[in-house]
Image: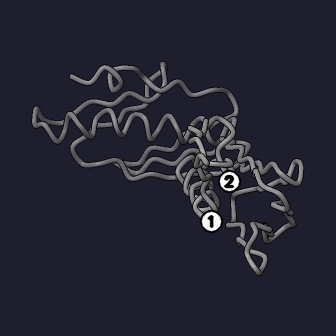
Amino acid sequence: MSRVGKNPVPIPSGVTVDLKGQALKVKGKRGELSLVVHDDVEVAQTAEGLTFKPRGDSRRARMQWGTARNLARNMVRGVSDGFTINLEINGVGYRAQADAKNLKLQLGFSHDVEVPIPAGIQIKAVKPTEIEITGADRQRVGQLASEIRSLRPPEPYKGKGIKYSTETIRRKEGKKK
């Protein structure tokens, strides 16, 4: 039995939800997101918000129940508040610059690395060593942050590289004489 799926998804003011069959559209001040809910899950819009129930008693239906509820919750939260991931760059000469279409990174390579910024996502270089990624779609924000981090992941000896601001790097001791 899903504990997550039992809870309704509250809809804050300023967010409109359009439910047609299994197609769910959520619109707010930060944009519009859509989702096709799995056929094993039944969605209903009530006074409390969106409620989810499994259509059958199969294991697959119960698994999709909690997943569908959390996907809808992330959509509602994304169009109302948005999601933000902060990255930190550590290393001598490592820096970032953001303009409207590209994020330009200097990561110790012989060339600068340019990352195109997808539509619906904003990137700010708060400092030359800090990047802020913001958007309404949680999956796309996390995916872009992961791709940027993979360009130069942090190494355990000096801690050089790109890391999440919430991440801690376990440091190793260097070689001894």
Vertical placement of 117 versus 65: above or below?
A: below
- Residue 102, disc: none
44 on left or right of 88: left
Which part of the image, by quadrant, shows the N terminus? top left
* Residue 94, image x, y percentages: 81, 60
Q: How would you rate the neighbour count of disc 2 (Cα within 10 Å): few for under 14, some for 14-19, many for 20 or more?
A: many
* Residue 162, image x, y percentages: 68, 53
Tell me, yes or no, whether the two marked residues, 2 and 1, touch with CB atoms within 8 Å.
Answer: yes
Q: Hey, which quadrant is residue 75 in on the image? A: top right
Q: Of the residues under marks 2 and 1, which one precedes in the sequence?
A: 1
**Nearest the camera: 22 or 68?**
68
Judged from the image, the secondary structure of the residue bearing numbered disc 1 is helix
Q: Which residue is mark 1?
A: 151
Q: How many marks?
A: 2
Judged from the image, the secondary structure of the residue bearing numbered disc 2 is strand
Which amino acid type corresponds to the residue marked 1 in the rendered image?
Answer: Leu
- Residue 162, disc: 2
152 on left or right of 42: right
Q: How would you rate the neighbour count of disc 1 (Cα within 10 Å): few for under 14, some for 14-19, many for 20 or more?
A: some
Describe the colour scheme in one phrase: one colour
Q: Is residue 96 visible?
A: no
Q: Who's the residue at 64% across and 36% down the image?
A: 15
